[in-house]
Image (cartoon, rainbow, N blue to C red):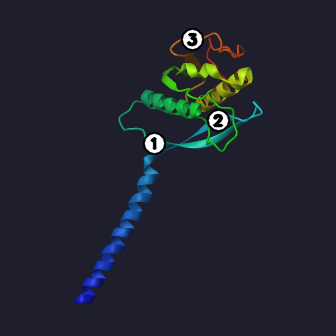
Amino acid sequence: MKNTRTVGLIVLLVVVAFGAWWYLNHRSAGQTGGQITMYYTKMDGKTEAGWPVSMLVQPSGETAAQQLHDTVQYAAVQAVAGPPPNIEAVRFPAGTRVNSVSVAGSTATVDLSRDVENQPGGTFGENAEFKSLVYTLTALPGIDAVQVTVAGHTLATLPGGNLELDQPLRRSDW
């Protein structure tokens, strides 16, 4: 009787362990919404490199427009945060954050905090950081251009003075 009970307990533990393994492996695969490619500008200021970032599943019931907005917002935040610390790249100034994102047609508008004006790399840094943002967002299906605003305002340029921000930016601008 004791052997039967022990065998039953072992079988139950094996079934529970297998069930947990199966659930976790299949749930993880179903919970990611795929990957998007984030771009960063290497220290030469010219070369773009990509790194994949996983997306979570979009909530069911969202419209295609809402899904695009959420994806653009996620990508913009990731682009401003930059690549992992062990990667040498031109980065947005410390403290720069995405205040808001909107999408109209094929243009994404990204409003950044004023911290973006503090790029220590001058024109070189400004070009490189915005190139990364534009490459990242225009890699998303449906986005062809990125309008950048700062603290809710359209600026002619940032302090470096080289990159015009009064019109949407496109990959062809680089």
Give the residue at x 48% y 30%: 68
Residue placed most toward the observer, 128 or 67:
128
Residue 37 in the image: state x and y as whole percent.
60, 39
The local secondary structure at tag 3 comes to: loop
Quote the CA–CA distance across marks 3 and 1. 32 Å
The local secondary structure at tag 2 comes to: strand
Give the residue at x 62% y 19%: 117
Residue 26 in the image: state x and y as whole percent.
43, 57
Quote the CA–CA distance across marks 1 and 2. 19 Å
Quote the CA–CA distance across marks 2 and 3. 24 Å
What residue occupies the far left of the structure in this picture? 1
Of callouts 2 and 3, the N-terminal one:
2
Q: Quadrant of residue 83?
A: top right
Crowd around label 3: few <14 · some 14–19 · many ≥20 (10 Å): some
Residue 27 in the image: state x and y as whole percent.
41, 54
Mark 3 and mark 1 in contact? Answer it, CB < 8 Å: no
The local secondary structure at tag 1 comes to: strand
Q: Amino acid at mark 2?
A: Tyr
Residue underneath mark 2:
39
Q: Amino acid at mark 3?
A: Thr
Give the residue at x 57% y 34%: 81
Q: Amino acid at mark 1?
A: Leu
Residue placed most toward the observer, 30 or 95:
95
Of callouts 1 and 2, the N-terminal one:
2
Looking at the figure, which quarter contains the C terminus? top right
Residue 56, disc: 1
Residue underneath mark 3:
154
Of callouts 3 and 1, the N-terminal one:
1
